[in-house]
Image (cartoon, helix red, strand yellow):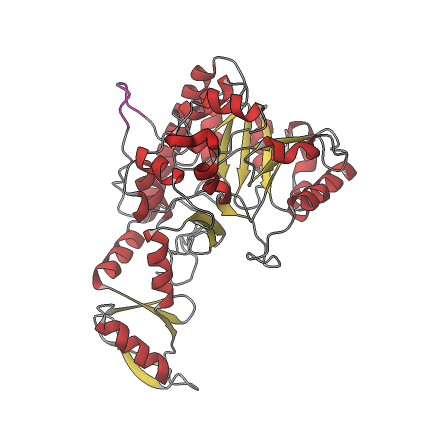
């Protein structure tokens, strides 16, 4: 199974090739690209003056793009394999996008994978189109909750349960508050717990799909006939990035070939509020430094927060601790002159140019998430989370569109699984070799 990677990273060409090679190809239904009658990319430009207007434009682009990618995948697959669509439940208008694509590409999509949140309604929507659903979960508890609330009503359309390892997978990760991001747990025991729950619900024949950290099939041989786990399938998310059919840039592919162990790490800068796994580059380094230049403040003097300090173009008065005042003054001498308040009664210090960029990105929000910490957009009647926008985060729509359409990979968010460093060490990729999807699939069947 090919793992879905959002914002056009897994598209109709890559997923169609994966299906043609006998697997389950997965194209991303998250703001997928669409094309004009001449095959030229239609750029996503927004004319709406309000966030709600731009949100509607975004949904129209997403539906149009999802249909386009489904058709491309179907044509390339030529009737072989299976085609799945991947959606994120926390993306803006997830239900409308899924409904629109399944309507416009009726009969071309065999399954829907969905994670990043608790996708209760994925079962009902998929079943209404006669399409199998594959929830992405990271714990037995999560699946139990989904089953109890919704999935028990549509058991015949549950195609499989994707267990995504929250410590090893790329993209957004499903770590709970009780789990330590620094201490990975054994996936086998966690998957066995998922199987136990499923068997108790009469789902003995529904496969579990292991995702996150899967590189060599030989590492998982003992799972295949293990009665505590089987039936089991395996999902590859990172390895399909480095194929000739993969739509990512040559610069991105070259960067993958040079990664070292530890270059992919968990962070919590995402505007979704989830942990995510991405490549350590200038983009993430800047976010870390931005948060490092952070101090607590109060609107009125209280306790240690007794030193008057002025921030912003109007010189707004706040109160900070004496030591923090000295730190802030030092940062300002280094040209981090703009103090920006966060939702957590802290203030960060950035350059004037970065402050302008942050405010512009927040103002240009088009509601790509159901709720966004960065811009404070929310998919509700008020159109807001009710909290202050968080300048410690970023516009995820902007950076993911930028990187997949050719911008400098060091200056954008670059998702990858934690095993991406194996591109450098795996002899299959020696001398910069980039295989076709067919050659990669043949390689996987050898165990390597």
Q: Which of 141 and 315 is in front in this view?
A: 141
In this rendering, is residue 253 above or below 385?
above
Q: Which residue is drawn at 32% across and 40% down?
A: 403
Query: Would residue 105 be seen by someone viewing this image from the given angle?
Result: no
Q: Main secondary structure of the magenta part?
A: loop
Is residue 40 part of the magenta span, yes or no? Answer: yes
In this rendering, is residue 309 above or below 207?
below
Query: Would residue 180 be seen by someone viewing this image from the given angle?
Result: yes
Image coordinates for residue 226, horizontal then vertical, percent: 74, 34
Magenta region: which residues?
Answer: 35-41
In which quadrant of the rendered image does the C terminus lie? top right
Q: Residue at x 62, y 59 (%)?
A: 178
Q: Residue furthest top?
A: 78
In this rendering, is residue 120 above or below 65?
below
In this rendering, is residue 174 above or below 315?
above
Is residue 306 part of the magenta span, yes or no? Answer: no
Q: Which residue is drawn at 60% across and 31% down?
A: 217
Question: Within the image, what quadrant is residue 400 found in?
Answer: top left
Image coordinates for residue 399, horizontal then vertical, percent: 33, 45
In which quadrant of the rendered image does the N terminus lie? top right
Q: Which of 109 and 148 is in front in this view?
A: 109
Q: Residue at x 61, y 36 (%)?
A: 210
């Amino acid at each position: 199974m090919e793992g879905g990677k959002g914002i056009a990273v897994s598209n109709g060409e890559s997923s169609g090739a994966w299906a043609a090679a006998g697997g389950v190809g997965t194209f991303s239904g998250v703001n997928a690209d669409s094309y004009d009658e001449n095959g030229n990319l239609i750029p996503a430009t927004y004319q709406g003056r309000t966030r709600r207007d731009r949100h509607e434009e975004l949904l129209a682009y997403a539906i149009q793009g999802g249909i386009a990618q489904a058709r491309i995948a179907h044509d390339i697959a030529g009737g072989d394999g299976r085609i799945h669509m991947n959606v994120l439940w926390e993306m803006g208008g997830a239900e409308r996008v899924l409904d629109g694509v399944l309507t416009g590409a009726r009969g071309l999509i065999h399954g829907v994978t969905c994670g990043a949140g608790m996708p209760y309604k994925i079962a009902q929507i998929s079943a209404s189109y006669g399409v199998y659903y594959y929830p992405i979960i990271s714990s037995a508890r999560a699946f139990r909750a989904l089953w109890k609330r919704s999935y028990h009503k549509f058991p015949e359309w549950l195609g499989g349960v994707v267990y995504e390892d929250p410590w090893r997978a790329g993209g957004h990760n499903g770590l709970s508050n009780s789990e330590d991001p620094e201490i990975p747990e054994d996936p086998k025991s966690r998957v066995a717990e998922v199987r136990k729950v499923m068997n108790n619900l009469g789902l003995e024949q529904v496969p579990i799909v292991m995702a996150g950290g899967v590189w060599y099939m030989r590492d998982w041989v003992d799972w295949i006939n293990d009665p505590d786990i089987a039936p089991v399938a395996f999902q590859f998310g990172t390895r399909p990035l480095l194929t000739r059919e993969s739509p990512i840039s040559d610069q991105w592919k070259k960067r993958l070939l040079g990664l070292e162990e530890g270059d992919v790490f968990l962070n919590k800068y995402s505007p979704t509020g989830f942990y995510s796994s991405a490549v350590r580059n200038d983009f993430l380094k800047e976010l870390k430094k931005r948060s490092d230049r952070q101090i607590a403040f109060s609107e009125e003097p209280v306790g240690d927060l007794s030193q008057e300090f002025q921030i912003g173009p109007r010189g707004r008065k706040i109160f900070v601790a004496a030591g923090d005042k000295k730190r802030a003054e030092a940062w300002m001498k280094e040209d981090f002159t703009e103090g920006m308040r966060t939702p957590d009664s802290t203030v960060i210090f950035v350059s004037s140019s970065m402050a302008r960029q942050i405010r512009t990105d927040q103002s240009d929000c088009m509601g790509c998430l159901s709720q966004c910490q960065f811009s404070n957009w929310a998919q509700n009647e008020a159109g807001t989370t009710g909290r202050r926008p968080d300048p410690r985060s970023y516009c995820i729509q902007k950076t993911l569109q930028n990187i997949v359409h050719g911008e400098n990979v060091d200056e954008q968010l670059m998702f990858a699984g934690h095993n991406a460093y194996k591109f450098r060490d795996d002899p299959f990729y020696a001398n910069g070799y980039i295989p076709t999807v067919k050659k990669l699939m043949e390689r996987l069947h050898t165990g390597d």
